[in-house]
Image (spheres, helix red, strand yellow):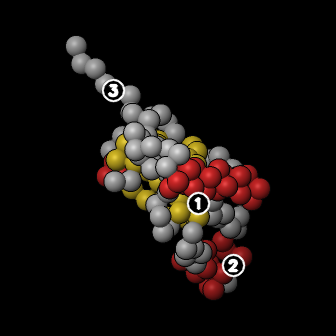
Amino acid sequence: MLLISCPYCQETRPEIEFRNSGEAWLVRPRDPSTLNDEQWGDFLYGRSNTKGWLGERWRHVHGCGRFFNAIRHTVTDQIIMVSPSGTPRPSDSELQKLIAARESEMQAWHSGEIGFGGSAPGHDSKPSSAKTTK
Ligand SMILES: [Zn+2]
């Protein structure tokens, strides 16, 4: 099960509470009327179709309802970063540091340095905050 941390709720929840809303950090043209049909079509439908790390918009539809950004690996489903909507895309060097840290965690997990007490790296093992009822 993919677990996703909502940057607003500060909780890690099952993916069924969320909806993927496509690629993140797309920049809308300032004046669409100046674009020709091909340029407008590229904006509307052209996506990177990345196999690997990709910035995506997600919405916590069964939680706070808010949109946020995540950097997810499209093959392994690992998520290395979530940020509130409107947060700038991390620079390439920041992204490389996050990826290197995740790969280091994965190597430690595969070598047995990290036991089975938690979940695999990339799947946040922090328990979500329990709600109590009185
Ligand atoms: Zn939320």
Which amino acid lies under the numbered mark 3 shown in the image of this protein? Ala
User: Is mark 1 in CB contact (under 8 Å) with mark 2?
Assistant: no
On the question of residue 58 being in view, the answer is yes
Q: Which residue is mark 3?
A: 130
Mark in the foreground, 1 or 3 = 3
Q: Which residue is mark 1?
A: 55
Towards the viewer: 47 or 104: 104
Mark in the foreground, 1 or 2 = 1
Which amino acid lies under the numbered mark 1 shown in the image of this protein? Gly
Towards the viewer: 88 or 104: 104
Q: Secondary structure at mark 3?
A: loop
Mark in the foreground, 3 or 2 = 3
Distance (Cα) linking label 3 and label 2? 51 Å
Distance (Cα) linking label 1 and label 2? 25 Å
Residue 129 x/y as whole percent: 38, 28
Crowding at dot 3, Cα within 10 Å, few <14 / some 14-19 / many 20+, comes out as: few
Residue 92 x/y as whole percent: 74, 59
Counting residues from the start of the chain, the first of labels 1 and 3 encountered is 1
Residue 32 x/y as whole percent: 66, 71
On the question of residue 56 being in view, the answer is no
Q: Which residue is mark 2?
A: 35
Q: Secondary structure at mark 1?
A: strand
Residue 14 x/y as whole percent: 34, 47
Q: Ligand 1 near label 2 (Cβ, under 8 Å)?
A: no
